[in-house]
Image (spheres, grey):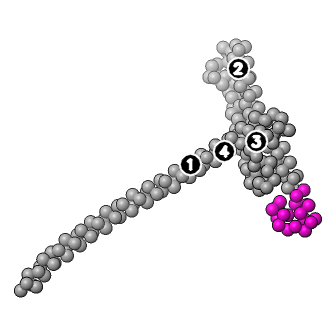
């Protein structure tokens, strides 16, 4: 008798436990979806942070190459990685990226300048005023800004071209010396 009376209670408790476990399972599923979404957001944020850090690092290097007007002082103006022989493998791709960036940025500035020049030719100045009201001061300001755009990153590009050429010559010399000495490891590193 006692056993039979408890079987009903056990069945009721089992149904309640099953419903509780289903609710718990649903909650765990919702938490896992939220956790997955948070994890994905954190990964995206981290990749944006890494990209921003890389952009800042490239900009600093580019500014240093652009600011140095005297190539003999370039060694002291830029990051030591560029003149550390042990870090040539790190410096070469970095210098190549900087040169591409300087060239692309300069070409973009020249295209914008060409567009502004074309707009000026057809009757509207870069500032939106018509050419019939042009005075000497606005022409001088317009010309000055175009001249600066033409020189935008020119020094950086020239310094980076010179640096890349010099680095290539150093690496070729190192490669040839290692090859003559039969040092395959040094030749591979220089390559």
Q: Earlier in the sequence, mark 4 or mark 1?
A: 1
Residue 74 shown left or right of residue 180 in the figure: left
Q: Residue 78: give its label.
A: 3
Residue where numbered disc 4 is placed: 57
Circles 3 and 1: CB atoms closer than 8 Å = no
Query: Is residue 65 at all visible to an observer of this figure?
Result: no
Disc nearer the start of the sequence (2/3): 3
Report the side of 165 relative to 3 (left or right). right
**130, 12: nearer the viewer:** 12
Question: Quick check: marks 2 and 3 in contact, CB under 8 Å?
Answer: no
Mark 2 vs mark 3, CA separation in Å: 33 Å
Nearest to N terminus: mark 3 or mark 1:
1
> First in sequence: mark 1 or mark 2?
1
Q: Position of residue 185 (x, y in %)?
A: 82, 67
**Residue at position x 84%, y 50% in the image:** 167
103 to 143, vertically: above or below: below
Residue 60 in view: yes
Label 2 crowd bin: few (<14), some (14–19), many (20+), radius 10 Å: few
The question of residue 167 being in magenta is answered with no
Quadrant showing the C terminus: bottom right
Q: Nearer the viewer, mark 2 or mark 3?
A: 3
**Residue that numbered label 1 is attached to:** 49
Q: Position of residue 153 (x, y in %)?
A: 74, 36
């Amino acid at each position: 008798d006692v056993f039979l009376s408890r079987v009903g209670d056990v069945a009721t408790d089992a149904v309640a436990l099953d419903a509780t476990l289903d609710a718990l399972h649903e909650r765990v599923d919702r938490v896992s979806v939220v956790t997955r979404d948070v994890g994905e957001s954190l990964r995206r944020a981290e990749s944006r942070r890494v990209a921003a850090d890389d952009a800042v690092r490239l900009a600093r290097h580019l500014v240093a190459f652009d600011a140095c007007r005297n190539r003999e002082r370039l060694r002291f103006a830029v990051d030591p990685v560029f003149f550390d022989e042990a870090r040539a493998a790190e410096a070469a791709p970095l210098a190549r990226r900087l040169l591409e960036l300087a060239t692309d940025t300069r070409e973009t500035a020249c295209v914008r300048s060409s567009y502004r020049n074309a707009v000026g030719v057809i009757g509207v100045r870069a500032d939106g005023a018509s050419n019939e009201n042009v005075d000497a001061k606005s022409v001088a300001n317009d010309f000055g800004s175009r001249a600066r755009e033409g020189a935008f990153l020119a020094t950086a590009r020239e310094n980076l071209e010179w640096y890349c050429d010099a680095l290539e010559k150093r690496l070729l010399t190192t490669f040839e010396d290692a090859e003559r000495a039969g040092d395959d490891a040094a030749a591979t590193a220089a390559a």
